[in-house]
Image: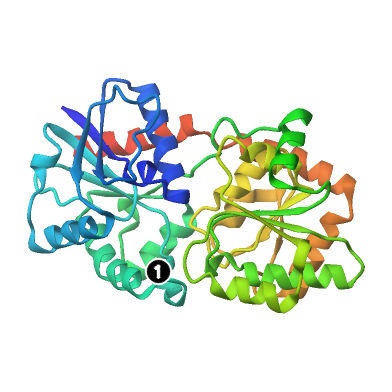
Amino acid sequence: MAIYIDISAAVHGRAGLGRYTENLARALVQKHPKRFAFFYNQDREAKPLAGLESVPTRTVRAGYKPWRMAVWLGQFLGLGFERLVPEAELYHATEHLLLPLRQVPTVLTVHDLIYHLFPEHHKPLNYWFLNRAMPLFVQRARAVIAVSESTKRDLIRCYGVHPDKITVVHEAAAPHFRPASPEAIAAVRARYGLPEGFILTVGTIEPRKNLSRLLDTVQRLRQEGDDARLAVVGSKGWLYEGFFRRLEELQLGDAVLLPGYVPDADLPAVYSAATLCVLPSLYEGFGLSVLEAMACGTAVVCSRASSLPEVGGNAAHYFDPTDVEEMAEAIGAVWHNEALRTEMGKRGLAQAARFSWARVAEETMAVYQRVMAS
């Protein structure tokens, strides 16, 4: 018998969901090396998790979109896919896709309800699928893990989920996120063309990240005489055209750096190189980059929307993400004050230390045990 973890998001490299899944899988296997097995849908882009090759693994050969439709239809028709996870004691769906299992208890992690709350920020097909599938997945799961109190509140308000069914388990920065050495910082400056002083934002380029307003904020700071420069680290997601259109309209030119995707191994040094880190999102299920920046000792200025205040605590400075003037004031206050940045960096290190993947594994295992005992 084994507890199966769906690691599809990790092997397919799906940004934040992949980071959550990989870090959780590693922490659980490290703590309970004989209890777990992995499952994922295998296509040409799937890359098994390095160092975890010895964990028993089952796969199904299917592309992402066909597999999502098969899972939803299986749930809708009341089918059982038990043969895909033989001798399963429990199955944990770590992204928004719950395998239909009639005889195996299931746990579903819900990261956010962005598709429901901000439908204009999703592609039509993805919006259509999630709005039909997620209420069913939440209903069918024996227990739900929410990554923040904010997401838990959304589940209760939008889907009427009973609070007792939901357990909040916060994420954490991976262990390698810590202040980088001067040599490592110099190396990433050279590799990605980073200046001595810059504002950093990390995340996929998509509408809810609110990056167009961040461009307006940088423009305002520069109009006031600042030589503010912005580095946007992250790949193109979806509906990103508005960001690039606004970038062209503002004619910011060399003031905005677009290094694109940066490998995980380089990110701590990139965070450490930044003068400050900004997360201007309209909504975040958790907002992992806040903790990653803090774990590297970098001052964080972020939106006060959704989960971000519960993640940043008293270590971050906050602003209304819809108010460019307030955003500029908050960022400018930190940008101009080195002593404040130093103090925020210290508070951030303490805040990030409150979160760990060992704790995530322990709290997640407690959910498994409650479900299996019931």
The answer to whether 293 appears left or right of 126 in the picture is right
- The residue that appears at 73% across and 38% down in the rendered structure is 297
- Label 1 secondary element: helix
* Residue visible at 24% across and 52% down in the picture: 98
* Residue at (53% x, 40% y) in the render: 172
Q: Position of residue 54 (x, y in %)?
A: 29, 21
Where does label 1 land, which residue? Answer: 115
Within 10 Å of disc 1 (Cα), the crowding (few <14, some 14-19, many 20+) is some
**Residue toward you, 126 or 356:** 126
Residue 286 appears in view: yes
Q: Quadrant of the C terminus?
A: top left
Q: Quadrant of residue 270?
A: top right
Where's residue 104, x and y in %?
14, 42
Amino acid type of the residue tagged 1 in the rendering: Tyr
Return the x and y of residue 110 as percentages of the image width and height: 37, 54
Q: Position of residue 106 (x, y in %)?
A: 22, 45
User: Which quadrant of the rendered structure holds the N terminus?
Assistant: top left
